[in-house]
């Protein structure tokens, strides 16, 4: 919805929400996809790399989300910044200060821009709230913790991309939280609704459960591999000039 599209100033509130939801899925599949390709190539060369994603969008808290999203980065900051600073061994005040430094560094790692630093501190605030009192209630819930997590994660991706031309953060927040008219979401849903639904399904635990059953049958497994190979080749050919979202990081 930035300068290259219809323009954020022209969209309706439903389309603005649809836009950041679609961006959240695109970012996940882009980053998790090439992480899997990297791990696969490493395995061919005899290296066993750790998984970098573990279905982050099924998380029931922001704390759990960051145990599932970009696992290697979270582990690096934990091992080389958080723990050497004292971790949680020197009282709650020091722990929160250590968390502040880690999340400020996480924002700066993504780019020396105010929106990335604000994005890192945004998660510091959310994680502080959870660690202070909210996490115990989230663990008792069933549906609402997942909705809460998805809401703040998707909103966070809006902050993450707020430096894009034509999509300032103030305008984005206005479009999201002050109901407005403009270009309807119906056209986008009509043309991309199936792809959006497929993305939601593929970011859930369902494909993993299906694969656990299919992988027991060699013929079914080969058919699935063949189908996925054909689909991947088709999409690679169609997206020859496309640049990965995370290419700049």
Image (cartoon, grey):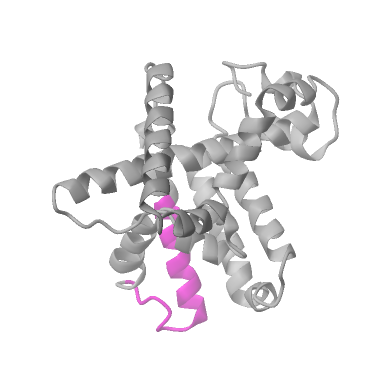
Instruction: Reply above or below: 159 against 94.
Output: above
Q: Residue 106, percent across and down? A: 41, 52
Looking at the rendered image, the quarter that the N terminus falls into is top right
- Give, as a single range, the part of the protein colored magenta: 85-106
Evaluate whether residue 116 shows in this view. yes
Residue at the limit of the structure toward the left, as seen here? 45
Left/right placement of residue 166 relative to residue 142 reads left
Looking at the rendered image, the quarter that the C terminus falls into is top left
Q: Residue at x 42, y 22 (%)?
A: 234
Q: Residue 204, percent across and down? A: 57, 52
Evaluate whether residue 156 shows in this view. no
Q: Residue 212, percent across and down? A: 45, 59
Magenta region, main secondary structure: helix
Q: Residue at x 22, y 43 (%)?
A: 41
Magenta-drawn stretch contains 142: no
Q: Residue at x 65, y 38 (%)?
A: 197
* Nearer to me, 22 or 166: 22
Q: Residue at x 52, y 54 (%)?
A: 210
Instruction: Reply above or below: 64 against 226.
Output: below
Instruction: Reply above or below: 138 against 223.
Output: below
Give the quadrant of residue 198: top right
Label total for image: 0
Magenta-drawn stretch contains 87: yes
Instruction: Reply above or below: 174 against 186.
Output: below
Left/right placement of residue 164 relative to residue 6 reads left
Left/right placement of residue 220 relative to residue 171 reads left
* Nearer to me, 70 or 240: 240
Q: Residue 49, percent across and down? A: 25, 56
């Amino acid at each position: 919805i930035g300068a290259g599209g219809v323009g954020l100033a022209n969209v309706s509130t439903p389309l603005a929400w649809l836009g950041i939801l679609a961006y959240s899925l695109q970012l996940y599949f882009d980053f998790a996809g090439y992480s899997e390709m990297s791990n696969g190539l490493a395995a061919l060369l005899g290296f066993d790399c750790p998984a970098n994603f573990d279905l982050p969008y099924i998380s029931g808290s922001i704390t759990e989300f960051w145990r599932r999203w970009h696992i290697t980065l979270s582990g690096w900051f934990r091992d080389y910044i958080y723990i050497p600073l004292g971790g949680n061994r020197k009282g709650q005040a020091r722990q929160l200060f250590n968390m502040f430094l880690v999340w400020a560094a996480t924002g700066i790692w993504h780019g020396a821009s105010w929106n990335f630093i604000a994005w890192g501190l945004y998660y510091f605030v959310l994680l502080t709230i959870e660690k202070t009192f909210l996490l115990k209630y989230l663990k008792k819930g069933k549906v609402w913790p997942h909705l809460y997590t998805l809401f703040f994660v998707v909103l966070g991706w809006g902050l993450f991309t707020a430096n894009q031309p034509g999509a300032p953060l103030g305008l984005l927040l206005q479009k999201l939280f002050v109901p407005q008219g403009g270009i309807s979401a119906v056209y986008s849903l009509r043309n991309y609704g199936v792809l959006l639904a497929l993305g939601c399904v593929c970011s859930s635990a369902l494909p993993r459960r299906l694969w656990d059953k299919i992988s027991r049958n060699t013929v079914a497994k080969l058919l699935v591999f063949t189908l996925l190979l054909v689909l991947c080749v088709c999409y690679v050919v169609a997206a020859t000039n496309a640049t990965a979202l995370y290419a700049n990081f």
